Amino acid sequence: RFYDAAYPQCLKEIDTPPLVLYIRGELTPEDSLSISIVGSRDAKDYGRKVSYRLSYQLAQHGLAVVSGLAKGIDTSAHRGALEAGGRTIAVMGSGLSFIYPAANSDLAEKITESGALISEFPMDVKPKPKNFPRRNRIISGLTLGTVVVEASNRSGALITARLAGEQGREVFAVPGEIFSELSTGTHQLINNGAKLINTVDDLLNELPPYALNRIQSDVPTSSIPSVETESSQAPPIEKSDPKPLATQPSSEVQQPIQSVPPPGLTPDERTIFDAIEVPSSHIDTIVRTTQLPISLVSSTLLMLELKGIIQQLPGKQFH
């Protein structure tokens, strides 16, 4: 709980911190020295290898790796940390009774032995698309900085990066192939001021002095195992399926920005969409207009942004 001594201090510093965290495994004080690695579910071999190698090296230096247990970049990040003998934390978009994707059940079990699965959702909450943008603030908030590896310009990883910046954390991006759609988001971040990293040293050199004083600096050069290529993609599960893991959240949202609300918005989404004026509205103005709690407005704006319905401008302006 928020007021417990074991509650991560770094999460207390963010906007709308979760009041309760459900944990399988263990969070330790040393986990305050951590980096999050996020990116596309549909990552290419290049992205998976970069994610794995970077995570492996961070773990060698004594930093924990935080990610979201999704396929692609997340999976490679968790595996890299574990195979280096380090710690890793998976922040879930469901209750802890539902491992999503199911293909990562074995990986999730290994994470509980050398880290933790954590969620703000009660145990029996199924994975739903709206849960994933909400959990992103925890992924970024737990760490000193967020690294984005392979992300399109509609990727949910960009929301995690934006939240990291708003939380005062470092934002890093790995450059990719210039003709790849999965490089458009990372290159956009670099153009907007994210720190470009080619090696783990590029990242370590940006850490605050107190963190540098605590990490392992003399790491012997060793062979890093090759990351296995993920050969299968979990098939989408229909909403009518009553089994756990009933929905397929998408980190790559392709809908264009729209000037009129599309069908299918929830009442809260429609209310907030209608409150955004031309050319833009500040989040505080939206809160005053709708008379809704700021936590609800913030999470709903994230969901609308992820759907590609609205855009955020500098200064928490939306249009």
Image (cartoon, rainbow, N blue to C red):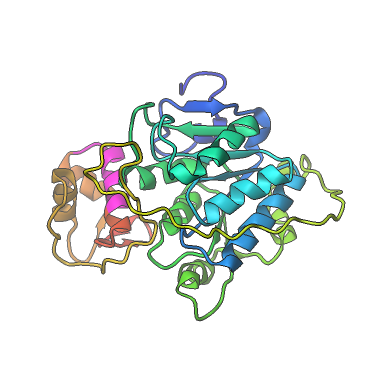
Q: Which residue ends up furthest to the top in the rendered image? A: 4
Q: Is residue 162 magenta?
A: no
Q: Main secondary structure of the magenta part?
A: helix
Give the residue at x 19% y 43%. Answer: 288
Give the residue at x 26% y 44%. Answer: 297
Q: Is residue 294 above or below residue 73?
A: above
Q: Is residue 141 left or right of residue 94?
A: right
Q: Is residue 238 above or below residue 89?
A: below
One can see residue 37 in this view: no
Residue 36 picture location, percent across and down: 57, 48
One can see residue 3 in this view: yes
Q: Which residue ends up furthest to the bottom in the rendered image? A: 179
The residue closer to the viewer here, 271 or 56, is 56
Q: Is residue 299 magenta?
A: yes
Give the residue at x 37% y 57%. Answer: 315
The residue closer to the viewer here, 18 or 24, is 24
Residue 270 picture location, percent across and down: 14, 50
Residue 35 picture location, percent across and down: 61, 47
Residue 132 picture location, percent across and down: 38, 46
Q: Start and end of the magenta stretch?
A: 292-303
- Quadrant of the drawing holding the C terminus: bottom left
How many labels sit on residues?
0
Q: Is residue 286 left or right of residue 51?
A: left
Q: Residue 88 falls in which quadrant of the image?
A: top right
